[in-house]
Image (cartoon, rainbow, N blue to C red):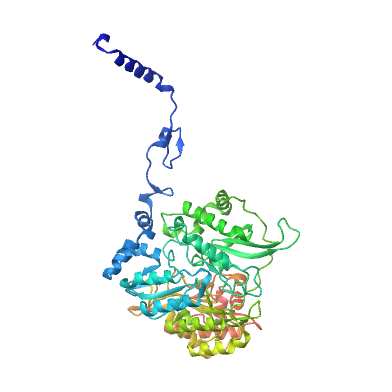
């Protein structure tokens, strides 16, 4: 074909086309990468493998794949539809339902357990009454105070889940994010705002953190669960050193690089089930900086935490890998203000805690009193819950504080009303006083309500408390923590005596029993308990612990607490002192 075959218009087009081809080699590239950022690298603009914060989908753990396929916050319609037909969810949704605080606890109980979120453990009387109504109408007729100053209600059937969640919302409460890989209930010193020795009322900070979490969808679905606590420096421990982040109020005096006043120290990576307490990370915060720093720290964990191996997915393992300084550098990048590195030495030492200060009558900073009520291993009936709410309204300010020690406080009671309040508690079958052993009992749910537990921890705790209290009137408190499995929900490593549930061989079968640890503690008594005995059947445990206490009373120094006595000796020395060399070896 010759040139005469083309029209003038066609010739113009072809000339332009070939001119473009000749010039193409010098044209710069412009594209976008997977994050939508503009790039001059052609390779970066090629579609890449889908990941979750850098982890390829094929490498995700089972739970991470479940979260990726559907966000747990998006299962409301499933909750409603299954309630209509009174059915439990299938396995993937069993995990997702925990985002709404609904735990299908089969086979221990073929029902749901509801776990609330109660910021700082602070409840108003009408809220406690409403929770009692939930337990009475849709639950099993009881509720448990947890080791995160929270409430759990059990034996809820699928048909009642929607009514339960709606009722919770109407009370001004929620259960959202109380389970699965989320930030759990934010705890605070239970006497915040009225404690005589505190540096700062930390309840507003716990509540602010609580509402920030609830209103930021990206703070759900972490690599693993996450715990945050605020310690005011009060007389009652909140066990902040067992949390992923612990904010400790402190005071700095004159003559330092910062203005004198009250600040927060920050501790990181408490996870006592893995035998590690939180440790100071070297920064000092103005109180107003605490929530932004917590938000930044959580997001660094979200972006960089391990989503492949559930056993290495807690914050501890990220910081073990990176080191504290690298972690803080990433946190710094998310803040509009620099983190303030500051030595611990100029900071005022936290006042000592009262080991059993959560029980009994104690004076507040305004001359009123708070009354610590014994709720044995955290269990209350609906009538007791309603009664406590009524007493708090009549003699206090309509407020109740739950504690991490599985009991509650009624604050703001005038001196002239104390006797009437005590009588009201007795009328409910409750008391404000108990023995030094029963006051220190802490127990997880146990195998009556948890599939992971090897033992009936709550039942055994009550039996142990009664047995030992009948025999010994101690002048020093002893805490006994019973946990049914290595998850350590009752934190057996921090008890004076810690009991870890186990199946113990007997003949051709097995019986419920415990491994025995001694010498644990938190705060100024901080230590991980050491294992004293292995695999003790429960029917032998009561006598064994009686001998342990007998040996302590016989060999201790004047005024010496059990934790001091047990740490003063090696394990072998303890066995020899207690004349138990061969028992349960």
Q: Does residue 423 sit above or below 162 in this rendering?
A: below
Q: Quadrant of the N terminus?
A: top left
Residue 41 spot, x, y in % from top left: 44, 33
Q: At 56% from the left edge and 59% from the top edge, which residue is drawn?
A: 291
Question: In front here: 498 or 11?
Answer: 11
Which quadrant holds residue 474? bottom right
Which quadrant holds residue 477? bottom right
Q: Does residue 15 sit above or below 373 in this rendering?
A: above
Question: In front here: 63 or 213?
Answer: 213
Question: In front here: 557 or 34?
Answer: 34
Residue 229 spot, x, y in % from top left: 55, 66
Question: In front here: 565 or 238?
Answer: 238
Q: Does residue 258 sit above or below 43 in this rendering?
A: below
Q: At 36% from the left edge and 62% from the top edge, which residue is drawn?
A: 96
Numbered circles on residues, count: 0
Which quadrant holds residue 203? bottom right
Residue 30 at least partly seen: yes
Residue 585 spot, x, y in % from top left: 47, 77
Residue 239 spot, x, y in % from top left: 56, 70
């Amino acid at each position: 074909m010759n040139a005469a075959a083309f029209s003038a218009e066609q010739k113009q087009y072809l000339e332009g086309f070939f001119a473009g081809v000749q010039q193409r080699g010098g044209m710069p590239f412009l594209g976008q990468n997977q994050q939508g950022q503009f790039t001059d690298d052609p390779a970066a603009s090629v579609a890449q493998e889908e990941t979750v914060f850098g982890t390829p989908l094929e490498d995700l753990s089972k739970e991470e794949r479940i979260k990726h396929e559907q966000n747990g916050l998006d299962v409301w319609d499933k909750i409603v539809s299954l309630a209509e037909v009174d059915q439990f969810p299938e396995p993937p949704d069993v995990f997702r339902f925990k985002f709404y605080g609904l735990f299908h606890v089969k086979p221990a109980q073929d029902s749901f357990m509801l776990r609330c979120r109660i910021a700082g453990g602070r409840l108003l009387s009408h809220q406690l009454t409403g929770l009692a109504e939930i337990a009475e109408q849709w639950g099993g007729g009881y509720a448990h105070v947890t080791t995160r100053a929270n409430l759990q209600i059990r034996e809820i059937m699928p048909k009642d889940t929607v009514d339960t969640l709606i009722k919770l919302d109407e009370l001004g409460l929620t259960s959202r994010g109380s389970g699965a890989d989320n930030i759990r209930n934010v705890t605070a010193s239970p006497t915040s705002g009225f404690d005589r020795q505190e540096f700062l009322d930390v309840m507003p900070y716990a509540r602010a953190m609580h509402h920030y979490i609830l209103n930021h969808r990206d703070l759900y679905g972490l690599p693993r669960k996450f715990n945050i606590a605020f310690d005011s420096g009060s007389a009652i421990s909140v066990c902040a050193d067992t949390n992923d982040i612990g904010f400790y109020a402190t005071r700095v005096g004159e003559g330092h690089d910062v203005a004198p006043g009250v600040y927060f120290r920050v501790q990181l990576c408490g996870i006592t089930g893995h035998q590690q307490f939180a440790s100071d990370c070297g920064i000092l915060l103005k109180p107003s900086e605490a929530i932004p720093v917590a938000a930044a720290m959580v997001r660094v964990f979200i972006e960089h935490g391990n989503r492949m191996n559930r056993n290495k997915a807690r914050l501890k393992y990220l910081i073990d890998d990176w080191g504290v300084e690298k972690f803080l550098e990433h946190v710094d990048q998310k803040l509009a203000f620099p983190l303030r590195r500051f030595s611990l030495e100029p900071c005022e030492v936290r006042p000592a805690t009262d080991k059993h200060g959560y029980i009994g009558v104690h004076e507040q900073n305004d001359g009123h009193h708070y009354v610590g009520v014994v709720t044995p291993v955290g269990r209350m009936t609906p009538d007791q819950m309603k009664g406590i709410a009524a007493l708090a309204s009549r003699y206090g300010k309509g407020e109740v504080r739950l504690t991490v020690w599985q009991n509650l406080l009624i604050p703001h009671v005038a001196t002239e009303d104390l006797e009437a309040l005590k009588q009201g508690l007795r009328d409910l079958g409750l008391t404000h006083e108990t023995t030094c052993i029963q006051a220190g009992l802490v127990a997880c749910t146990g195998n009556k309500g948890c599939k992971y537990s090897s033992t009936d921890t709550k039942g055994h705790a009550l039996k142990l408390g009664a047995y030992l209290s009948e025999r010994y009137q101690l002048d020093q408190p002893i805490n006994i923590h019973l946990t049914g499995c290595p998850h350590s929900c009752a934190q057996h490593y921090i008890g004076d005596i810690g009991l870890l549930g186990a199946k113990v061989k007997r003949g051709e079968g097995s019986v419920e029993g415990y491994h025995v640890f001694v010498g644990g503690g938190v705060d100024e008594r901080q230590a991980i308990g050491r294992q004293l005995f292995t695999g003790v059947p429960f029917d032998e445990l009561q006598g064994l612990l009686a001998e342990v206490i007998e040996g302590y009373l016989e060999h201790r120094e004047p005024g010496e607490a059990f934790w001091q006595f047990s740490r003063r000796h090696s394990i072998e020395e303890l066995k020899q002192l207690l004349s138990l060399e061969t028992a349960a070896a």
